[in-house]
Image (cartoon, grey):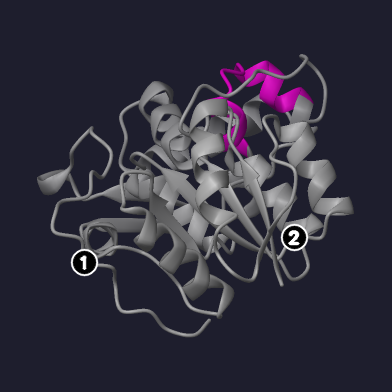
Amino acid sequence: MTRILLYSDEPILAKGLESVLRQVEGFDLLPTCATVGCLMEQLTTGAPDLVLMDLTPEITFAVLSDMKHLMTNSRIVLWVNSISTELAFQAMGLGVRGILRKTLPTELQVKCLLKVQGGELWFEKALTDSFLCARRVALTQREGQLVSLLSQGLKNKEIATTLMISEGTVKVYLSRLFQKVGVKDRFELALFGLKNLTTGQLPVGEKGQRASMPGLRSLVLERPAERADAPVRFPIPLRPVASRHY
């Protein structure tokens, strides 16, 4: 029996999917979660095999990273209308096994979950093709922490206090990052960081406190010649990428 945990903050949408999944032989649905707190609790107590997560603004890089540490055998599938190339790439790096469109026919939604539970991956061709139009900038641990904090709106002095380094050191890191990433200023770097971290606005922590958000390991940037501000939107007909065993 496959234990499935559904997370969504849209109750009507969640009820519709629940009714579909309950009809699938071998699926056992755990109580649906509408908050990240409930999601984390169910990961600990419910021991789901599959986690189907609505990509709400609360699902950030930090949340996905925390989930990875809580889970042992669970597999994550993101349930989306659209997703940026950057976040999709980071999600894959954190072990997300599939990105599933909400607009797919119900039989394909079920097929995706069965494939992922069987050890395969589910990423549509339109999404994987977008990775080919992107470049990856590897970050050191300190650089990743700095970009994460910058994306939260922290100033140099606040970043220095949080990372327990001098304000001058923060300025040196920022100057190097501008050249490394190819951006003009801190605002542009923060935008890139934000797109890699989350689909929504990051909450700003208490000033002077050590941030709980882990640093990014890399920035995924669309190449300038082909860059688009809009997130990846999947075309029709559907063409899931050839699945492979993880």
Task: Give the residues drawn in magenta, as a range.
Answer: 146-161
List the single residue furthest toward the bottom: 245
State whether residue 187 is above or below residue 216: above
In screen coordinates, is 210 left or right of 100? right
Relative to 239, say whether 174 is above or below: above
Q: Nearer the viewer, residue 173 or 192?
A: 192
Q: Which residue is mark 2?
A: 48
Pointer 1: what residue? Answer: 239
On the image, the x and y values in percent for residue 137 come to 40, 55
Of pointers 1 and 2, the one earlier in the residue sequence: 2
The kind of secondary structure the magenta stretch mainly shows is: helix
In the image, is residue 144 above or below residue 49? above
- Is 187 left or right of 134, judged from the image as shown? right
Q: Is residue 149 magenta?
A: yes
The image quadrant of residue 212 is: top right
Quadrant of the drawing holding the N terminus: bottom right
The answer to whether residue 106 is left or right of residue 128 is: right
Q: Tags 1 and 2 in contact by the CB under 8 Å rule?
A: no
Kindly identify the residue that appears in the image at 60 percent across and 29 percent down.
58
Which residue appears farthest toward the left when viewing the image?
A: 225
Q: Secondary structure at mark 2?
A: loop
Image spot of residue 210 (x, y percent): 81, 30
| Front-most of residues 138 and 99 | 99
Identify the residue at the far front of this view. 23
Quadrant hosting residue 14: top right
Q: Is residue 43 magenta?
A: no
Q: Compared with residue 54, is residue 95 higher up or lower down, i.e. above or below?
A: below
Circle 1: residue type: Arg
Q: Residues within 10 Å of mark 2 (few under 14, many from 20)?
A: many
Where in the figure is residue 196, as x and y percent of width and height? Answer: 46, 42
Seen from the viewer's position, the closer of residues 29 and 70 is 29
